[in-house]
Amino acid sequence: MHILVTGGTGYIGSHTVVELLQQGDRVTIIDNLYNSSKKVVDRIEAITKSRPDFVKLDLCDQDKLENLFKISVFDAVIHFAGYKAVGESVERPLMYYRNNLISTLNLLTCMKAHQVTKLVFSSSATVYGQPERIPMDEDCRLSTTNPYGTTKLMIETILSDVAKANPEFSFVVLRYFNPIGAHKSGLIGETPQGIPNNLTPYIAQVATGQRDFLRVWGNDYDTPDGTGVRDYIHVVDLAKGHLKALDYANTRTGIDFINLGTGKGYSVLQVLHAFEKACGKQLPYQILERRPGDIATSYASTKKAEEVLGWKAQYDIDRMCVDLWRFATQNPKGIR
């Protein structure tokens, strides 16, 4: 199959491209390199011994996107491209709505015009907002607490309407929980710009001496150690879930929504201690006040993914931290 991967030089996208190439698919990456580097393409090739096609392209430029669809034949699309920082989305909501929505609308317009009917979309557990119940299943009430999450929920609505109006389409929406870790080669991983928004890249920067200490936002939640509990999933497990979703899309039409997580929760301090084990040293941290909007516990029900996709996460928190530490030591400044 020839798969178009938008945002394919990013964190999750690059790991998914590796898995696609290793199973023999042809891959074309389009990315505007807003938050990634073209060097990732070289590293994908070093891992797989196969080079994906790469086109530097902004999905908001519909003319250039249309030209790509005119000269290429794609069997399916995996759509990762989009802005993704929760805090930034609160500060710059117009930028998030404009980019994430227009890029997706342009992509769907080109897919319809060129009869590309299969799409796997990168959504998020943020569409559940304050969770109705734990573990969160796909039937939980949907709500959002920030513009980033709202763009994901709006795109889910757009996809539902497009699928309803075009019965030949097959969409699989994957709601991620908290991806961490890196490829075992240490060649690709998460390389955030500036101060990391996510827990484990921040811990990694503390471990490599780039940050003085980890900030722990609250230790008085109703959890085993008082710190927030989240569902952390190895990025390679997550990538493999996309291949299963593509297989599923090939067997059906319409739209479906599926969680990808481990079904287990780890607290902030449990993750910190697992990373200490991986790097072989104690890491400093400070307890600060709770952040507004944070919740005590969030983890997925993975029953549907197991039943529908035949997929289940394989890696535990220790393996996630070992692989992240390897990447962090080999790439202390990220891939730039």
Image (tube, rainbow, N blue to C red):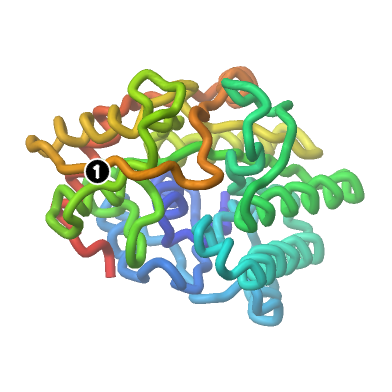
Marker count (numbered): 1
Amino acid type, residue under disc 1 in the picture: Gln
* 292 versus 307 height, above or below: below
Residue extending furthest left?
280
Give percent across and percent down for residue 315.
34, 27
Q: Is residue 91 visible?
A: yes
Give percent across and percent down for residue 149.
63, 50
Which residue occupies 42% across, 32% down? 228
For the residue labelled by badge 1, is the local secondary structure a helix, a strand or a loop?
strand
| Residue 113 as seen in the image, left or right of residue 226 | right
Front residue of 263/128: it is: 128
Which residue occupies 29% across, 51% down? 202
* 75 versus 133 height, above or below: below
Which residue occupies 88% across, 50% down? 166
- Read off the residue under disc 1: 286
The part of the image, by quadrant, that contains residue 247 is top right
| Residue 143 as seen in the image, left or right of residue 82 | right
Give percent across and percent down for residue 115.
78, 58
Front residue of 7/64: it is: 7
Q: Is residue 23 visible?
A: no
Give percent across and percent down for residue 30.
52, 67
The part of the image, by quadrant, that contains residue 130 is top right
